Structure formats: C-alpha cells, structure tokens
Amino acid sequence: MKNENRNWMTGLALAVILSAGTVAVAQSGGAGRTDASTALSKPAKPKNDAEAKILAVIDEMTQDRTQRYLSVSPEDGRLFRQLTEAAGAKRVVEVGTSTGYSGLWFALALRSTGGKLVTHELDPGRARIARDHFKKAGVDDLVTVIEGDAHETVKQHKDPIDILFLDADKEGYIDYLQKLLPLVRPGGLILAHNMRSPRPDPRYIEAITTNPDLDTSFVLMEGSGVGLTLKKR
Ligand SMILES: C[S@@+](CC[C@H](N)C(=O)[O-])C[C@H]1O[C@@H](n2cnc3c(N)ncnc32)[C@H](O)[C@@H]1O
C-alpha cells in the first residue's frame, strides 16, 4: 500500500474511533450522565480521617439511590465543595435538604473552613434521614436542619451568608432570592440547581442575569445545570 493511502486509512480509523467515543460518551447522558470532563475525573480522595468519614457516607449514598431523593450529582457536589472551601465560607444556607447528600458535600469544605451549614427542609421524614446521614458522617456539629416551609423559615436568617444554595421548589427560587439576597455578603455566591432540567423559572433567570450587582455563569449544564451567581463587591 502506498504511504499516502496508508496515512489516509489511519486518519479514517482514528476519526471513526474518536467519533465512536463521542457517541458512547453522549449516549451515557441523562441523570448521572458522563461527559468528557467527568470521564477524566477520579473519585474524591480523602486527605484525613474526618474527610474519609464524610466521603464514606457520600459514597454509600452515591451507590444506593434509595438513600437519595432528587439530589445533586456527585459532579455538582464536588463543585460545591471546591467553591465553598476556596471561598473560605463560614456560613452556608441551603434551601432543600432532602436526605442530606448536597449538605454532605458542603460539610466536606466546612470541616476545614470552620464554617456552618443551615439547611431547610419541608418534609419531616427526609429531614430525619438527613440528620441521620450528618450524624453518621460526623458532621452533625456543623449542620442545622430547619424543618418547615422555607418560604417562612428563611425569614429567621439575620447574619451574612457566604454561600446560598437553592434546591427546593423551583417556582420558589425567586422568592428565596428576594428574601435572602440582601444577606448574601458582597463577594458571596448564590448557587442554584436545575438550571437546565427541569426547566428553570424564567423569572429567576431574569433576576440573576439582569441585575448589575450580580454576575452569573451556568455550569455543569450537561447534567441538571447549576447557576453560579456572584454578588459583586
Ligand atoms: C431537589 S430536593 C433537594 C436535594 C438536595 N439539595 C440534595 O442535593 O441532596 C428538593 C427538596 O426541597 C424540599 N422542599 C420543597 N419545597 C420546599 C419548601 N417550600 N420548603 C422547604 N423545603 C422544600 C423537598 O421536600 C425536597 O426534599
């Protein structure tokens, strides 16, 4: 075979392998979907015993979906931990605890920043399971679960918030933002889950993309999608 033919065939074979890989990656989409960046990641590695204890519960919940209810993905959770720790956050407020999966990712960071998480949940059964998970992970001293309708219970907050995470009723995000944005400190973050799926409330998108005091990016949009909003200094 001539050299130029051999080169062309090699190129074709490479293109077929690459496109097959792309399809395989794309087809693994949906909940827990794997994109190229996720495929490159390795599981989070514990740095010390405290982290190992938290990650063990996270891993157990990741493997056993029955322990979670509409939780964020592991990729979302890792990003929250990274942002929380990088920001040196001391006060995180979460709206929508569920069984505590996202809360555990925040707790991983808060264990080293010396911060606290206050998380709101309407459903008493899920709040109880979340408390059990926080205890098992050894972070019950870092986390306060407030039961009740968060549209009412978030009014209790008076102190500045470093990171606000919205993940409860989707049509409620705009109300939570209006009530809590004044408490988010300048330089603080508002994270919002489900910015792609289920379809986000257009009023919330409008609020975080048109306010000159805020700057918003949308990330991990190959999954459920996360809104990452900076409250400017
Ligand atoms: C998507 S799940 C939260 C998942 C959790 N953040 C995680 O990743 O593990 C939404 C939770 O918000 C709760 N919720 C819905 N409406 C609420 C409200 N008005 N006040 C407080 N919690 C609410 C639901 O009961 C549900 O457990």
Image: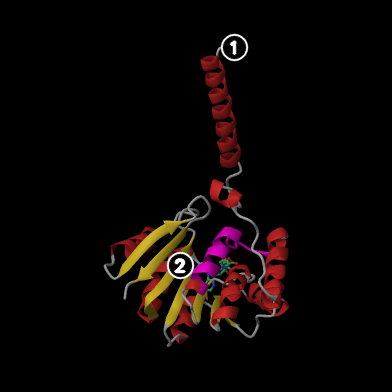
Nearest the eye: 175 or 230:
230
Which disc is residue 191 wearing? 2
- The residue shown at (43%, 68%) is 173
Which corner quadrant holds the C terminus? bottom left
Amino acid under label 1?
Met
Q: Is residue 214 visible?
A: yes
Q: Secondary structure at mark 1?
A: loop
Residue at the spot of label 1? 1
Vertical side of 36 occupied by 232: above or below = below
Quote the CA–CA distance across marks 1 and 2. Answer: 58 Å
Amino acid under label 2?
Leu
Which corner quadrant holds the N terminus? top right
Which residues are the magenta region? Answer: 67-85
Ligand 1 resides in the quarter of the picture at bottom right
Vertical side of 216 occupied by 14: above or below = above
- The residue shown at (55%, 69%) is 81
The stretch drawn in magenta includes residue 31:
no
Image coords of residue 205 (percent x, y): 37, 60
Q: Nearer the viewer, mark 1 or mark 2?
A: 1
Quadrant position of residue 29:
top right
The stretch drawn in magenta includes residue 76:
yes
Q: Secondary structure at mark 2?
A: strand
Horizontal side of residue 227 vs 8, given as left or right = left
User: Which callout, 1 or 2, points at the residue further toward the start of the chain?
Assistant: 1
